[in-house]
Amino acid sequence: MLKTIQLLNKQPQLLKLLKEEKVCLVGVSESETKSILETYSKDASELGVYWN
Amino acid sequence: MVNIESKEIRLSMESIIKETIQQQDLQRLLLSFVQHKVEDHYPFGVLCVFHYEQFAPSFDKEIYQVAAAIELLILSFDILDDIEDGDVIDKPWSSHPALSLNASTALLFLCTSAISQTEFSYKEQAIAIMEKYALNAIQGQHKDLLNICQNENDYMNMMQEKSGSLVCLACSVGSVIANGDVLPEIESYSKWMGVVGQINNDIMDLKSWHEKNDMMNKKYSLPIIYLLEYDDEELKFMTDYYAGGMSKEVFLSYQDIIQQKLVDTDAIKYALVIRNVLRNKIMDELQRLSYTENQIQFLQQYMK
């Protein structure tokens, strides 16, 4: 998972493609992809809890 | 409901101590430790009672003695953990570590003896489960103290052992006392619940630069492992610090950069993704066991 998130961080355009189901991540299950998208979609509020 | 149960658990812990420990000073010391935990509401004991209620054909109040035994074990581990980590400020076990160590040894024996004294048919299985998961937790704690889990896989395994085992212990003992069995789903979701709690603690730890801050003490956690493996020249100071090539004072001058990098590189988000993967896994298993909405909400408190 670590390498996957680093990849998404360095290539943020992948996230958009992932949301649109135009790409899938090798070695990442469907439920893990769902969790990634969930986390990225609510990151502002989640991070706010921890970092503001 | 939780308040009523935590009160019953506390009373049972006190009664076990009063009935078994005759040495007055040791008894007073142990009772003060139990009192110190009152505001936590004895969550491991409450989880044990919850799982007993789900699977037992009828309710026997003696389950509070089993729940109390689990809390005595957790209390013993908390004392040992704090002394091992040198984290004994503002705790009743801080004033005299030698006496506290002796008291924590007493707690280890009190907990199995308390379960033995119940009338439950499956008490021997419960004690075997307690010993198995307690030993797993001790092995996880040993790895943590050695600070040898420096990649994602090793760190996840260590968290399962150190934190997952104790939640699993509480849920499994409640279930086995109820009907002699522990469903694999219970072992799985409870273990992950412990890991979720540990990830939350690890994230919170990075928020402030207190004396026990993981990064300052060259400890590892998921966001730290992520940053150390992140390819960025600006983060080279971190690997230098962890390798012993930089003083704490110099490292602390990078505080603002670290805070910024934790967000910009998605290090925190990475830990949150892992936490959400586990939360979803837990939810799938809770739904497979046909828990009601209220029961799921109750268990979700342990994943916040």
Image (cartoon, coloured by chain):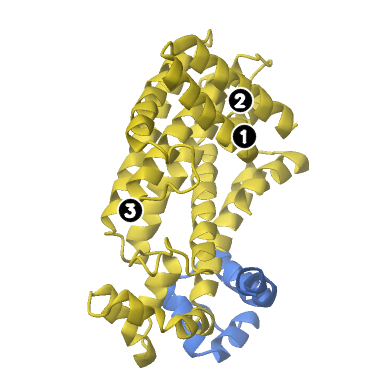
Residue B6's spot in the image, x, y percent?
Answer: 66, 29
Residue B39's spot in the image, x, y percent?
Answer: 64, 39
Question: What residue do we see at 43% from left, 10% from top?
Answer: B22
Disc sitting over residue B144 in the figure: 3
Q: Chain of mark 3?
A: B
Amino acid marked by disc 3: Asp
| Among numbered discs 3 and 1, the one appearing first in the sequence | 1
Where on the picture, by quarter, is residue B110? top left
Q: Are marks 2 and 1 in contact (CB under 8 Å)?
A: yes
| Among numbered discs 2 and 3, the one appearing first in the sequence | 2
Q: Which chain is represented by yellow in the image?
A: B
Amino acid marked by disc 1: Val
Query: Dot 2 corresponds to which residue?
Result: B10
Where on the picture, by quarter, is residue B62? top right
If the image is split into quadrants, where does the N terminus of chain B sit?
top right
Secondary structure under the numbered disc 1 in the rendered image: helix
Query: Dot 1 corresponds to which residue?
Result: B38
Out of B188 and B265, give the one closest to the viewer.
B265
Tally of marks:
3
Secondary structure under the numbered disc 2 in the rendered image: helix
Marks 2/3: CA distance? 30 Å
Secondary structure under the numbered disc 3 in the rendered image: helix
Q: Is residue B231 visible?
A: yes
Q: Chain of mark 1?
A: B
Question: What residue do we see at 51% from left, 31% from top?
Answer: B33
Residue B179's spot in the image, x, y percent?
Answer: 56, 20
Q: Chain of mark 2?
A: B
Q: Are marks 2 and 1 on the same chain?
A: yes
Marks 2/1: CA distance? 7 Å
Badge nearest the viewer, 2 or 3: 2
Q: Which chain is represented by blue in the image?
A: A
